[in-house]
Amino acid sequence: MRKLALSDEILLQIDKPARYIGNEVNAVMKDPNRVDIRFCMCFPDVYEIGMSHLGLQILYDMFNKREDVYCERVYSPWHDLHKIMKERQIPLFTLETQTPVRNMDFLGITIQYEMCYTNILQILDLSQIPMLAADRTEGHPIVIGGGPCAYNPEPLADFFDLFYIGEGETRYDDLLDLYKSNRQKGGLRQDFLRQACKLPGIYVPSLYEVAYQEDGTIASFLPKYEDVPATVKKEVEMDVSKTSYPHKALVPFLKVTQDRVVLEIQRGCIRGCRFCQAGMIYRPTRERSVEMLKECASDMLRHSGHEEISLSSLSSSDYSQLPELIDYLMDFKEKGVNISLPSLRIDAFSLDVMGKVQDVRKSSLTFAPEAGSQRLRDVINKGLTEDVILEGAGMAFEGGWQKVKLYFMLGLPTETEEDQREIPRLAEKIARRYYEIPKDKRKGKCQITISTSFFVPKPFTPFQWAPMYDKSSYLARARVVNEEMKAQLNRKSLKYNWHEADVTVLEGVFARGDRRIGPVLQKAYEKGCLFDSWSETFCNGLWMEAFQECGVSIGFYNLRTRDTDEILPWDFIDCGVSKDFLKREWERAQRGEVTPNCRQQCSGCGAAQFKGGVCVEP
């Protein structure tokens, strides 16, 4: 029987002790003495969030298929346990074997969201691993980062030994083999890093140096040695039907955010929304075969006991074999398994599919116009007209739905006050469409919930050069929407929520920051900033102190429009989408010109180089 790293006395003092005991259904158990490499996979948030992340489960399954590797897991301890571990000097440990993380060969951290950056420092701190990569010695694990935020790794460059840029299925085996070979030859940590940087997709920050101009912009970003690549190209798995996928997914002991089987049906998106980083960095769009998905769905439901299955995709409606897959899953629905279909477009086909799989009496429809006016939807290349939105809503209401959630963004490039006021006006038109249905066919009042987030420009999007705003400007925009909503005829059917503005400001700094942000992150963590993505624990005042004490200007990163010739912190990464294409799209956005989706016409983004997916050669 395993000896737990936490005593019963400690477990009784903390909230949700099941977060820390491991031993879940389908957890992999190996003899640590019979493997060559021990890899700790980390999600820097609480267990309930991390256990819901499909990417971590895929890599966990893939690594553990190797007989010479044991992949274990760790998540961020909540504040109560954090305090106890610091006071008693208890090192952070893996769930599978309760081994201190500092004793592993690798610590792999998936970086999904900028506001988790201080949690990364928490993981290093509680693991008793030096925060700065420069301070680590031969006895410390190699700290590797991956995920969407790794497409601008520079704010975190000081804390990581290396970053994996792209999809993990392609290059991790080579990296692990290289580590094993280097150790067998008696090579040192630095020897491994110097060799690893030559693998495609691997970025070692310590092997590059940055110089800055007097105005604060980057003057140069260059390798320190001739044999270090000047460009790091993302890794892409083109045949997603033959790659590793967990048929026996981990099943938690407590309720988690995504407490269901998750089936990734495709990667990438054909739509080309100019604000969407995922739609750019995951190009080209690649579909999993329906045969693979049927097999995975059956196995995952059988081995997990879950009563819900969710189809994961950036745009599920665009999956070409969706009707056949849904027909197959309907057999499970008849056995009591719910089917969840996020990311569907509101059209006749999608509504027909949702009508088959959802209980319209209990569920609400969710769709994202993103902008209230047609002008602004054209600027962001959303590809939705008002007629399409109203027609879709009308079909939904006639199909029995009466609850609708609408998602918008405020602070988009070229946005005017009129654009802001169009948000509640569009919502009111949708409500009006409901009341056009004869009263005897309606089911009470409709409920339209408007939610606005504040726009954050992300790397490798056409809006990466766009300015942001300060907190007061964002809140002023939200007040305009709220004021206009109260003037609508059907205002009692409308409800409005908006995102925190101060969190958005910081997210923008971290998304497009450079290495000068690293000391701010460390200072903020030392002041107590942790779980910054959680409203109840976020403390903006401490962050403002950290920026001031480090002499770093938020305005420099957020409030200026970047020149398209400026060297950006992430320019050394080749994400498969060319900078020339992004510039063209930036210019088209300012003219309000729409670019057709990838199935209609190739826009020459550069992803055709990967030879597959839905790409059409120009």
Image (cartoon, grey):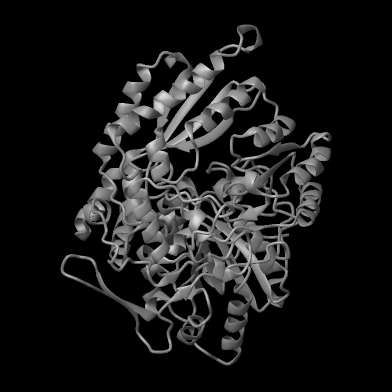
Up-down: is 253 above or below 372?
below
Q: Is residue 71 left or right of residue 471?
A: right
Q: Quadrant of residue 130?
A: bottom left
The image position of residue 447, as x and y in percent, is: 53, 20
Q: Is residue 89 left or right of residue 223?
A: right
Q: Residue at x 29, y 38 (%)?
A: 474
The N terminus, quarter of image: bottom right
Residue 536 seen in the current view: no
Residue 324 seen in the current view: yes
Up-down: is 510 above or below 177?
above
Q: Residue at x 47, y 60 (%)?
A: 123
The image position of residue 279, as x and y in percent, is: 51, 54
Query: In this orientation, which residue lies closer to the viewer: 539 or 85?
Result: 539
The image position of residue 232, as x and y in percent, is: 46, 75
The C terminus, quarter of image: bottom right
Q: Quadrant of residue 581?
A: bottom left
Residue ranking furthest to the top: 440
Q: Residue at x 23, y 66 (%)?
A: 217
Q: Residue at x 31, y 39 (%)?
A: 415
